[in-house]
């Protein structure tokens, strides 16, 4: 879901970026100089809403469609809570209009599941994706592309939870469906290969991950062209695999190529451009170029704050990256400040008990432990363990938090 935020806050009158009056439709922003445009837009928006509800305020399929599109816009800008509310309303109306197992219910449930996955609410995500799967099977058949899409989304959600074997089973099934329904050289095949590569990457099967990313890149070049966002994404994923193998200069070259494509496709102020700055910074940091890495992370944060807002998850991700560089430089005060700011942003974006907060608490505990502050380290690692337990988490980071807690309690 890292490539989702594709609609920056641009003025509906002049196209410039920044702040201004926001229409109730949540779709457009206007500066003072374009207030006439805002009022015209708002008036037209009201007419659309009235038309969608019918002459007598009746809720119907058009209202569901409008709420669904609102949900998509919110999701793309990382406003997951607002996206959830729009999708829930669209789903309720669609079920009333079309019945429980209609394709439209499946589509809304699918997107709602993706939103829950982005929020770290994986149980809710799987429930919605399973509902979309039932709807697609009912409407399109058991081996349709839509069924493949739902299975791929379920595989991605399982991947995010570290359930790699289960994820691969879903992804293999989706891959088989795609090969039969759309052929071997289709964007859906490239997408499922990329997700499978993510599983292999985390399982340490780096050669297999690299081969799949190269195949996904080849398909995307054929389908979308060399200078496309899909190719940029594949290059970034391939670079990540190279970095994991310690091939840092090769990784940097691929990241830089991906960055160039993203700038040409999206312009300078776009979340995917910020993502590449962060990735290049990670390579620079591993090469010992810490000051250059901090500059790159700073560029990423500046773009994200301007485009996505101060309290977006991506901003917190970049702050965590900066904190890690400060930690590598043995600058505990600067690292703690960055982690604390990230904690605030994660909490506002995702809620107090999100999984990212657990990792931040663990990192803060390790820094405090290294400085001899056992009491402060204990407070933070206990929060990490508590959040991990709430999510039923069993991975490397949850194990590390539990081990640190036991060690600190033994010397308290």
Image (cartoon, rainbow, N blue to C red):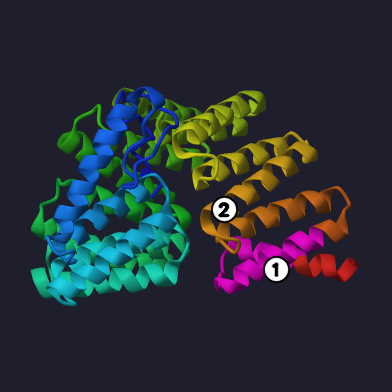
Q: Which residue is mark 1?
A: 402
Q: Is residue 233 above or below residue 303?
A: below
Using residue 352 as the reference point, say whether residue 151 is left or right of it: left
Q: Are marks 1 and 2 in contact (CB under 8 Å)?
A: no
10 Å neighbourhood of mark 2: few (<14), some, or many (≥20)?
Answer: some
Q: Main secondary structure of the magenta part?
A: helix
| Front residue (pair 342, 19) | 19
Determine the residue positioned at 21% across, 62% down. 107
Using residue 195 as the reference point, say whether residue 294 is left or right of it: right
Residue 164 spot, x, y in % from top left: 42, 64
Q: Is residue 64 above or below residue 364?
A: below
10 Å neighbourhood of mark 1: few (<14), some, or many (≥20)?
Answer: some
Residue 268 spot, x, y in % from top left: 40, 24
| Front residue (pair 208, 343) | 343
Residue 174 spot, x, y in % from top left: 22, 63
Mark 1–mark 2 Cα distance, whole angstroms, equals 26 Å
Question: Which residue lies most toward the front here?
Answer: 56
Q: Which residue is mark 2?
A: 348
| Segment tinted magenta in the rendering | 377-404
Mark with earlier residue (1, 2): 2
Res 172 visible: no
The C terminus is located in which quarter? bottom right
Residue 13 located within the stretch drawn in magenta: no
Determine the residue positioned at 29% across, 35% down. 39
């Amino acid at each position: 879901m890292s490539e989702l935020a594709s609609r920056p806050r641009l003025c509906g009158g002049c196209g410039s970026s920044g702040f201004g009056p926001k229409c109730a439709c949540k779709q457009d922003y206007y500066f003072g100089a374009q207030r006439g445009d805002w009022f015209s837009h708002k008036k037209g928006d009201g007419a659309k809403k009235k038309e969608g509800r019918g002459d007598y305020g009746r809720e119907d399929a058009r209202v569901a469609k409008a709420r669904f599109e609102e949900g998509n816009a919110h999701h793309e800008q990382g406003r997951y809570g607002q996206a959830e509310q729009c999708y829930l309303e669209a789903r309720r109306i669609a079920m009333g209009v079309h019945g429980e197992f209609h394709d439209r219910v499946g589509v809304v449930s699918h997107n709602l599941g993706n939103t829950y996955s982005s929020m770290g609410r994986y149980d809710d995500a799987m429930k919605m994706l399973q509902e979309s799967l039932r709807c697609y099977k009912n409407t399109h058949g058991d081996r349709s592309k839509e069924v493949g899409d739902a299975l791929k989304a379920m595989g991605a959600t399982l991947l995010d939870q570290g359930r790699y074997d289960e994820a691969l089973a879903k992804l293999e099934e989706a891959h088989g469906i795609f090969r039969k329904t759309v052929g071997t050289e289709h964007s859906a095949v490239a997408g499922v290969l990329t997700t499978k590569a993510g599983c292999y990457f985390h399982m340490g099967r780096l050669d297999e991950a690299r081969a799949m990313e190269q195949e996904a890149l080849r398909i995307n070049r054929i389908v979308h062209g060399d200078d496309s966002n899909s190719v940029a994404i594949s290059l970034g994923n391939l670079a990540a695999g190279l970095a994991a193998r310690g091939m840092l200069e090769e990784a940097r070259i691929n990241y830089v190529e991906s960055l160039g494509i993203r700038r040409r496709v999206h312009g300078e102020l776009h979340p995917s451009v910020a993502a590449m700055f962060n990735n290049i910074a990670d390579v620079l940091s591993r090469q010992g170029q810490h000051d250059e890495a901090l500059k790159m992370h700073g560029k990423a944060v500046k773009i994200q704050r301007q485009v996505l807002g101060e309290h977006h998850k991506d901003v917190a991700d970049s702050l965590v990256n900066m904190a890690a560089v400060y930690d590598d430089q043995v600058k505990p005060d600067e690292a703690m400040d960055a982690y604390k700011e990230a904690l605030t942003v994660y909490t506002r974006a995702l809620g107090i008990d999100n999984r990212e907060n657990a990792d931040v608490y663990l990192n803060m505990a390790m820094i405090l432990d290294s400085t001899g502050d056992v009491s402060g380290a204990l407070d933070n690692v206990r929060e990490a363990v508590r959040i991990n337990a709430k999510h039923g988490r069993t991975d490397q980071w949850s194990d590390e938090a539990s081990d640190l807690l036991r060690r600190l309690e033994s010397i308290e």
